[in-house]
Amino acid sequence: MQYLTELQNWINKNKDDILSTLSQLIQIPTENLPPSGNEKPGQEYLYNKVSKFIPDKDIDVFEVEEVSGIEEHPLFFPTMENMKKIYKNRPNLVARLRGTGGGSSICFSGHIDTMPAGKEKWNVFTNPFSGEIKDGKIYGRGSLDMKAGTLAGFYALKCLKDLKVDLKGNVYAESVVDEENGGVNGTIAARLRYPDINFAILAEPTDLAVGIETIGGSDWKVEVIEKGPGGIGTDIELPNPIYKLAKVALALQKYDKEVLGRIEPPSTFSRDMRLRLLTYQFSSGGSTYLESGSVPIKGHMYFWLEAFEYMSENYVREKFMEFMRNELAIYDDFKDSFPKFERVIRFLYGHKTNTNHPAMTSIRNAYKDLGLQCKEQGIPLAMDAFAFKEVSNTEVVVIGPSGKNPHGIDEYVDIDSFLNLIKIMVLTAIDYCS
C-alpha cells in the first residue's frame, strides 16, 4: 500500500494534463499506410513531452533498419502483397528511467500506428481524429488501439520520477511503429535493441483484464481467374468469376462454422469463445455501376483466419487448404482452375505468459492495492506479443484499457480505465523493480 496515496494525489493533480495530451496525440494522424506509414509526427509529439522529464541520453529514437541484424532475422517480414515495406522516417521511441542498479527491469510497450480512419462517417464526433471527450470517453482513431495504452507507459515513468521512487531496476516506456496490418517489425527492432529487459506490459486493450494468452492469425487473399476475354457478346461463352467467388465464400463460411466453431478454446479463454474466419472484401468487376459494363475475368476476396497459440503456421495452412480442396472439389468449375490462396501479411503467432514469473506477483499486488479484480485470462486478439519471447529474453503480459470499436467508427477509450492503467503500471514497477 506504500505510495498509494501519493499515486492517487499525483493522478488527481495531473489528470487534466494527461487527458489533454492523449487528446492532442489522437488529433495527430499516425495511420499505418502500407508500404509506409505516417507515425513520425506522433513520435515527435511524444518526444517533446517525454524530453521534459527524461534526459536526452535516456531517450532513444531509431528507425527499424538501423538495428543491426534485423533484416536477417527470421521473423523480419519485408513485404506486403509484393510491396517492400518502407521504414524511412518512421522512428521507434524508447525512454528509460534509470534505476540504481541490481534490480529487475520492466517495459511498458505500445504502438503509435493506427489503422486508417476510412471513409465511413463517424457519428458521435464527425472528425475521426477529434480527440473529444463525452460521457467519460475520449473518441478518435487510435484512442483505444492503442494511443491510450502507449501514453500510459510514458506517464507511468513521469509519475515514478515525480514521486522520487527509489528503484533498483530500469523502467522503460516505448512507442513502436508498424504493428497494424501484421507489421510487427517495429516491435522486433525494439526487442533486438533491448533484448534483456526482464518483463513487459503490452498495453493493447483488454478491459483491464490480465491477458496471459492471446490468439494468432493472418490475413489471406483468394483469387479466381477465368479464361477468355471478358466483356460481352453472343458468340462465345463468358464464364464469370463472381459465381466461383460465391462458391468459395460459402466454403469459407462453412469452415468458419463447422471447423473453427467446433474447436474447444484453451482453458484461459471463456467457454463460449471461438476462433473466427472473417471475410473482409468480395471484389470483381469494379465497385460502381459505371464500371459494370462487362463480365470480368478476375475476382478476389480478403479474409482473416485465426488460430490458437498452440497451432503452428504450417498446421493452420495445411488444415485450411485440405478443407478447401475437399469442399471445392464438388464443383466442376474448379477442376481445371483451383483458386489461388495466399497469405497477405505475416502469420501472427499467439502467445502465453509464464504466470509464475515474479512480475506477475507484482501485478496481482497492484490490483489488490487498487481494489481492482485481477482477472487473468485469454484475450481473443492477435498482436505483437509473440515477438517478445521469440526475439528477446523478455516475458510479456497484455494489460490495457476499456473502450469500443477499435478499427471501426466511433472508436473510444474509457477515461477511468486509462487512468487506472497508469496506476497499475506504477505500482507494478515499484513492487517489481525496487
Image (spheres, rainbow, N blue to C red):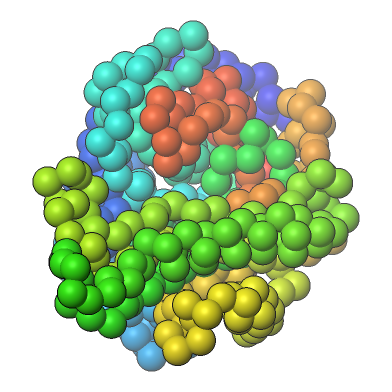
Determine the residue positioned at 67% across, 60% down. Answer: 254
Q: Where does the N terminus fall, quadrant-wise?
A: top right
Residue 347 vs 274, above or below: the answer is below
Residue 166 in the image, given as x and y percentages of width and height: 60, 44
Residue 220 in the image, given as x and y percentages of width and height: 46, 68
Q: As drawn, which residue projects farthest toward the front?
A: 235
Q: Quadrant of residue 154?
A: top left
Q: Is residue 64 visible?
A: no
Determine the residue positioned at 33% across, 67% down. Answer: 240
Residue 13 vs 45, above or below: the answer is above
- Classify residue 269 as left or right of residue 346: right
Q: Nearer the viewer, residue 77 or 291?
A: 291
Residue 212 in the image, given as x and y percentages of width and height: 74, 54
Q: Nearer the viewer, residue 346 or 370?
A: 346
Q: Nearer the viewer, residue 132 or 49?
A: 132
Determine the residue positioned at 39% across, 53% down. Answer: 281
